[in-house]
Image (cartoon, helix red, strand yellow):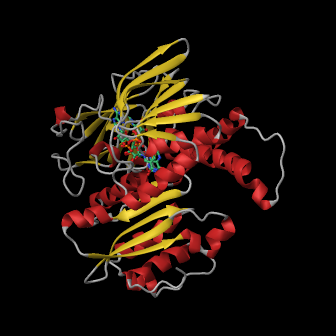
């Protein structure tokens, strides 16, 4: 008998969720992870909990309070003097949130009898995983199934080498101990916009250099245009179509050379963040040696059920490509665990929601108007502005809109795009409707509480049939 039914390598949102689901289904499960805290203690939760989703949202929250008080407290009749930010306290709050949540996963492992094996995992056979602990001790465990959930790491670019002092990646940008006076970011993707927003709100002069000519190329154009305008208003400078050629450090500043719309330019900053995407992490895994295929970009090759060429070895999350999102990794973990347990679980990818946590937030699910046009699909649009929402007015959050796209013949919802306060929460309704293959009429006939921001989704659904009430 093998030591375990399932060994999972990686305890990010893909791996730890897979481990818990395997255990729920009665499988003897172990989860290997090499991550350690700054104090050198093993930690669970992967990129997302330690240096990704959670710490970034903690800083976004702190910086939003600061910015909001500065800009809008007076609108409410709230007077304050000498508002200041104590970065050490803000960082300590973030660290405490991370610690609470990562320790929470350790608690869930204990409760569900998942064995945590701290150390570096390596495949030494199709049914064997070697684990090398931080003390150098090596143990090998046999297992019926393996799930690779080793995630991703920041993509490095040779023209801007991360030195973790002046030129940093997202992990460094989450840990600044003071507000940089001038902050540059390469890449206007999710990380560039979210971390750029954090430090801009706290007082940095932020400049983002983006290689592509379109802002947020994957988003609906009308939403992306509105967000671009808003970020500019908030003080972020974003240069599109900017090709960076070098970044050099001297005299405690970074000089970034790039060619942009105005020809060759230079940007001088105190800190530079490289945020140009992430790449799959298979280093040291020994995957090809056991017959697992890795593509040219480093992603582990899997079939639609996330099974590799070796039938008892699966891979999930960032390491296989597709949307590099925590919730996508987790759902793949659930599907794979259930399939290992003999169930016939499937996953729908066209309903994976996307969120960019700037303020107000951007969230979408399904296809954009541009994608529908390209595919030659006839569609109807309902668009409702938050300026016409009573609740948004009460919040003083009138910027943005909900756009709903539905099939012109069947009325099935094909995409919903939101730019507005709490878009990350509002999108869930659209995801559920699309998961049930619902129509705009279904949402239009669903009662929404008043006054709520969700009424804007309702109105957009009414708008598809040309019968909005409040706009
Ligand atoms: P990971 O979370 O990367 O976990 C993989 C784990 O495997 C790591 O702990 C790693 O140390 C470990 N590992 C790797 N190799 C080995 C080995 N050989 N042996 C042992 N352990 C190993 N996504 C969202 O959906 N929403 C967000 O708001 C969001 N914000 C983000 C903000 C930032 C700054 C960053 C960087 C990312 C963010 N993401 C967000 C992306 C999200 O973090 C990833 O999509 C998600 O963590 C992927 O999960 P995963 O389980 O595939 O891998
Ligand atoms: P990204 O792919 O979202 O954006 C990278 C951006 O950098 C792109 O716009 C790209 O065109 C640009 N770029 C690439 N090379 C460049 C260069 N040499 N010069 C200038 N611009 C360049 O990647 P990211 O922002 O680094 O985030 C990494 C991953 O983490 C993403 O897959 C993202 O989905 C995930 N993430 C998600 C969230 C969220 O869900 N809210 C937040 C943060 C990160």
Q: Is residue 449 left or right of residue 69?
A: left
Compared to residue 76, the image places residue 298 above or below, namely above
Q: Residue furthest top?
A: 251
Image: 107 above or below 392: above
67 or 118, which lies in front?
A: 67
Q: Position of residue 297 (x, y in %)?
A: 22, 37
Quadrant for residue 122, please give it: top left
In x, y percent, where is residue 182? Answer: 57, 28
Quadrant containing ligand 2 reads top left
Task: Please tell me which residue is depicted at 58% across the width and 34% down the height of the picture.
Answer: 205
- The residue drawn where x is 38% and y is 32% is 262
For the point 76% across and 38% down, the residue is 84
Residue nearer the viewer, 383 or 441 = 383
Image coordinates of residue 145 in percent, x first then y, are 27, 48
Whole-percent x and y of residue 203? 65, 36
Vertical arrangement, residue 1 with respect to residue 391, above or below: above
Q: Is residue 347 left or right of residue 208?
A: left
**Residue toward you, 331 or 324:** 324
């Amino acid at each position: 008998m093998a030591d375990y039914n399932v060994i999972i390598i990686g305890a990010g949102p893909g791996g730890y969720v897979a481990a818990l689901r395997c255990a729920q289904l009665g499988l003897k499960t172990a989860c290997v992870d090499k991550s350690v805290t700054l104090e050198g203690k093993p930690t669970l939760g992967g990129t997302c909990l330690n240096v990704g989703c959670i710490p970034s949202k903690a800083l976004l929250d702190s910086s939003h309070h600061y910015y909001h008080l500065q800009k809008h407290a007076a609108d409410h009749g709230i007077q304050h003097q000498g508002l200041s930010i104590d970065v050490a306290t803000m960082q300590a709050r973030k660290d405490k949130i991370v610690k609470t949540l990562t320790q929470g996963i350790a608690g869930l492992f204990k409760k569900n009898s998942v064995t945590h094996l701290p150390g570096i995992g390596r495949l030494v056979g199709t049914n064997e995983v070697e684990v090398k602990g931080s003390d150098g001790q090596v143990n090998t465990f046999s297992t019926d199934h393996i799930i690779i959930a080793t995630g991703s790491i920041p993509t490095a670019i040779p023209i801007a080498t991360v030195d973790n002092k002046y030129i940093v990646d997202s992990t460094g940008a989450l840990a600044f101990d003071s507000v940089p006076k001038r902050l540059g970011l390469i890449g206007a993707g999710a990380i560039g916009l979210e971390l750029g927003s954090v430090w801009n709100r706290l007082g940095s002069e932020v400049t983002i250099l983006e290689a592509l000519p379109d802002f947020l190329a994957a988003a609906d154009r009308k939403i992306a245009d509105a967000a671009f305008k808003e970020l500019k208003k908030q003080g972020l400078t974003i240069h599109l179509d900017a090709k960076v050629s070098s970044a050099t450090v001297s005299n405690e500043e970074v000089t970034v050379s790039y060619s942009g719309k105005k020809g060759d330019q230079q940007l001088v900053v105190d800190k530079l963040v490289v945020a140009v995407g992430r790449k799959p992490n298979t280093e040291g895994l020994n995957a090809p040696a056991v017959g697992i295929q890795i593509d040219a970009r480093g992603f582990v090759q899997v079939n639609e059920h996330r099974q590799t060429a070796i039938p008892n070895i699966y891979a999930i999350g960032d390491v296989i490509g597709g949307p590099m999102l925590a919730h996508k990794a987790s759902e793949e973990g659930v599907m794979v665990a259930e399939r290992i347990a003999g169930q016939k679980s499937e996953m729908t990818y066209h309903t994976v929601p996307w969120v960019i946590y700037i303020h107000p937030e951007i969230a979408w699910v399904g296809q954009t108007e541009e994608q529908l046009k390209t595919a030659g699909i006839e569609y109807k649009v309902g668009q409702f502005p938050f300026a016409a929402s009573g609740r948004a007015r009460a919040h003083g959050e009138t910027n943005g809109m909900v756009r709903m796209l539905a099939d012109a013949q069947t009325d099935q919802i094909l995409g919903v795009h939101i730019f507005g306060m709490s878009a990350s929460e509002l999108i869930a309704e659209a995801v559920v409707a699309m998961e049930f293959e619902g129509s705009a009429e279904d949402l239009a006939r669903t009662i929404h509480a008043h006054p709520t921001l969700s009424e804007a989704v309702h109105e957009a659904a009414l708008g598809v049939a040309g019968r909005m009430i409040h706009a």
